[in-house]
Amino acid sequence: MSTFTDLTQVGTGGTAVAVKDIIDMAGFVTTAGCRAIGRGASPAAADAPCLAGLRAAIEGGEARVIGRTNLDELAAGATGVNPWFGTPLNPLDRDRVPGGSSSGSGSAVAAGEAEVAFGTDTGGSVRIPAACCGVVGLKTTRGRIPTEGVVPLSQSLDTVGPLGADIARTVRGMQLLEPGFAPGGPMRAIGRFRAPDVDPTIDAAVDRALAEAEFEVVEVELPSWGSALEAALRIGLGEGFRNHGAMIAREPELVGERSTAAILMGRELGEHDAEARVFQRRWGAEFTAALERVEALAWPTLAGFAPPLPDFRSIDSICRTMEVNLTGLPALALPVPTGGPLPASLQLVGPAGSEERLVATGAVVEAAVGPGPFA
């Protein structure tokens, strides 16, 4: 099992940071977890713009990069299983999937190898490994952190965000992505959405965490939920096919079976892109209306616990994340106790640009129910 694709270190002091191997970093080959991309590629000539704050911190002795993290190939998956680089260990339970696509990033912070890790999130790829590994992950507002220099899956949905073992280290990650970032005032009025088919143990853990944090909780509905995932897949995988379809046709033996299937699915799904974008506007309006009643929305990140490794494909059915990517809004995933050996993951979704308040709200939850297992 492999958490990293490259363990070359950059810098000597400060915060230990791991960077997902889909983000260009000067002097490193960016593989996106894919042989077809990595084989014969030249090292990046420059950092992706999102790394400017990290690079300044390295030069000031305030941060160091400990390595480049593994991922689902082309970021086109949620399992963390990679046919070329192996599967990162889930430190919470080594017999379960680490979640993806930012699998190495989730594994690195849970194992204590990195204080902060950078990931990308197109359909949950920061929040899913955070939930599987028992750490914190922040999906940022679409467009807040630049995605130039990041191998694209879907330009309409891709985001960059941090993972940390707790809220404080996740905040540190945001400060390295966006210098000057600081928590704001916590949200108090929370809209509780009942996502479908959630394990009762997980739903109860989320309800208990919200109650112990003493939020004002209001039940809310999102009537179009059942159609949102399909629309997100049409846009996300449609763009994925336009980005990578030709490469797969040219070098099919250098792209894994699972990623190939996902990307090629986008050929047909992308034909309905216009309809999906009409729905996307209606879906965004539905969220806006809900967030006029409350300050944030809450539901579980995953509807079940991370599946066992032999059953890794089943994770696709329990993710409750890509619906958020369709809105472009920010979302925080953080572990909350269930009373059993595995935590649940509470997902908080706020208005555009509300990351400062989301992390402050997460800190209230963390203070009420205790930090995650690796804090």
Image (cartoon, helix red, strand yellow):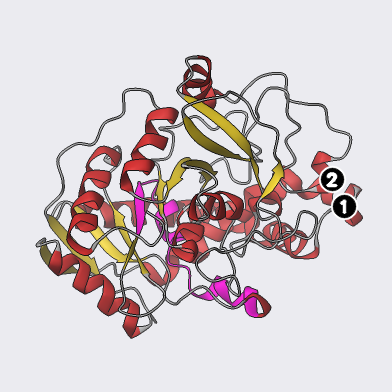
Q: Residue at x 31, y 23 (%)?
A: 180
Closer to us: 14 or 206: 14
* Secondary element at tag 2: helix
Q: Is residue 159 visible?
A: no
Q: Is residue 178 above or below residue 313?
A: above
Q: Going by the picture, which residue comes out furthest to the front?
A: 13
Q: Which mark is residue 36?
A: 2
Residue type marked 1: Leu
* Secondary element at tag 1: helix
Place of residue 368 in the rendered image (x, y in percent of width and height, measured from the top left): 17, 60
Closer to us: 170 or 126: 170
Image check: 245 left or right of 202?
right
Q: CA distance from mark 2 to mark 1?
A: 5 Å
Disc 2 and disc 1 in contact, CB within 8 angstroms: yes
Closer to us: 23 or 271: 23
Residue 145 in which image quadrant: top left
Q: Which residues are magenta?
A: 311-334
Q: Which mark is residue 192?
A: none
Label 1: which residue?
254
Q: Is residue 162 visible?
A: yes
Place of residue 353 in the rendered image (x, y in percent of width and height, measured from the top left): 30, 37
